[in-house]
């Protein structure tokens, strides 16, 4: 890049380089890197003076790293999630926009003054959103990995959320809450081990992304543990692979849940499923084997076992 040109020229050149590297949103990424480097807003950069050599050099270095498919959030140190900004970096899974949907479901469906557990919390994204949008709730965030838990604690400091380093599938974890929780929400590891993923995913911790048993091993344990945590009629919602919709509904049914419904992500792919713990004498209304799109309409389930690249 020519360091004599202004920000508009630098961004244009950076966007071309990122596009060539296969980055999905090259112009936006170039603008965000420039905003981070300069300390200005993206709009202000349109009329800003040309950067000095040191600033331009930092910008070029970050663009080079992004061209190698290092996540943008690692470069800026932050990830936006609903109404909060999270600190992220090596050692923790970077939250994706799709997870805002299951977080929104939790925000909407948790009863006033209720108890909520976020399992496999990672950066603490869902718990942070709940604390921000539903301060009436009591929230626990559970994360097993030591490196990720440092980010969990950092992001949840001062929010009132109780961060717990533990295995969310272990019967001893938060056993004191058994039978009293109103809602459990999670974005667990769920990508099948043999699936090809986007290059950025390789920067995430492997155990936060992939799971054994075709991606369902953690989900199976989560369903079992959630049944113990939840009161009768309590709700469970979790994200899963796009090929898992029918499988997770079946697991929920045999695991003591009813009313299972799958919701689509922004791209129309089945992305998260919700259900209620069965009431005594199975009084819970059933919507089993249904699927909803992002607008809330009930869709016909399309059985699938697809392979291919995952854009997490």
Image (spheres, grey):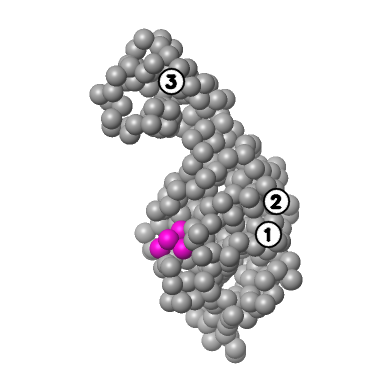
Coordinates of residue 266 in the picture (x, y in percent): 42, 50
User: Which label lies toward us, 2 or 3?
Assistant: 3
**Does label 2 or label 3 sit earlier along the sequence?**
3
Corner quadrant of residue 6: top left
Q: Quadrant of residue 40?
A: top left
x%, y% of residue 21?
51, 23
Q: Position of residue 271 (x, y in %)?
A: 52, 55
- Secondary element at tag 2: helix
Q: Which residues are magenta?
A: 129-133
Tell me which label, 1 or 2, sits earlier in the chain: 2
Relative to residue 194, is residue 282 drawn left or right?
left
Extreme residue toward the bottom, this view: 281
Residue found 52% across the figure and 71% down from its top: 138
SS for tag 3? helix
- At x 40%, y 11%, the residue is 3
Number of numbered discs visible in the structure rendering: 3
Quarter in which the C terminus is drawn: top right
């Amino acid at each position: 890049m020519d360091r004599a040109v202004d920000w508009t020229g630098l961004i244009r050149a950076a966007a071309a380089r990122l596009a060539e590297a296969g980055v999905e949103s090259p112009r936006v990424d170039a603008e965000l890197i420039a905003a981070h480097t300069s300390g200005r807003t993206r709009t202000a950069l349109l009329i800003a003076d040309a950067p000095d050599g040191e600033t331009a050099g930092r910008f070029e270095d970050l663009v080079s790293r992004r061209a190698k498919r290092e996540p943008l959030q690692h470069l800026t140190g932050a990830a936006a999630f609903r109404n909060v900004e999270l600190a992220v970096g090596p050692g923790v899974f970077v939250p994706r926009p799709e997870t805002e949907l299951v977080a929104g479901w939790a925000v909407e469906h948790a009863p006033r003054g209720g108890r909520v557990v976020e399992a496999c919390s990672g950066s603490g994204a869902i718990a942070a959103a709940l604390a921000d949008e539903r301060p009436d709730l009591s929230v626990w965030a559970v994360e097993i990995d030591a490196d990720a838990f440092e980010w969990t604690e950092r992001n949840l400091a001062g929010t009132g959320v109780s961060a717990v380093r533990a295995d969310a599938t272990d019967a001893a974890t938060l056993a004191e809450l058994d039978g009293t929780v109103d809602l459990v929400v999670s974005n667990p590891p769920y990508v099948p081990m043999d699936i090809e993923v986007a290059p950025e995913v390789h920067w995430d911790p492997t155990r936060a992304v992939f799971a054994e048993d075709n991606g369902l091993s953690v989900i199976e344990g989560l369903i079992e543990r959630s049944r113990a945590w939840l009161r009768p009629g309590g709700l469970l919602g979790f994200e899963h692979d796009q090929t898992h919709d029918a499988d997770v509904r079946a697991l929920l049914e045999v695991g003591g849940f009813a009313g299972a419904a799958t919701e689509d992500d922004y791209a129309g792919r089945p992305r998260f499923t919700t259900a209620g713990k069965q009431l005594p004498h199975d009084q819970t209304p059933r919507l089993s084997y249904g699927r909803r799109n992002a607008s809330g309409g009930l869709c016909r389930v399309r059985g699938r076992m697809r392979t291919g690249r995952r854009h997490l």
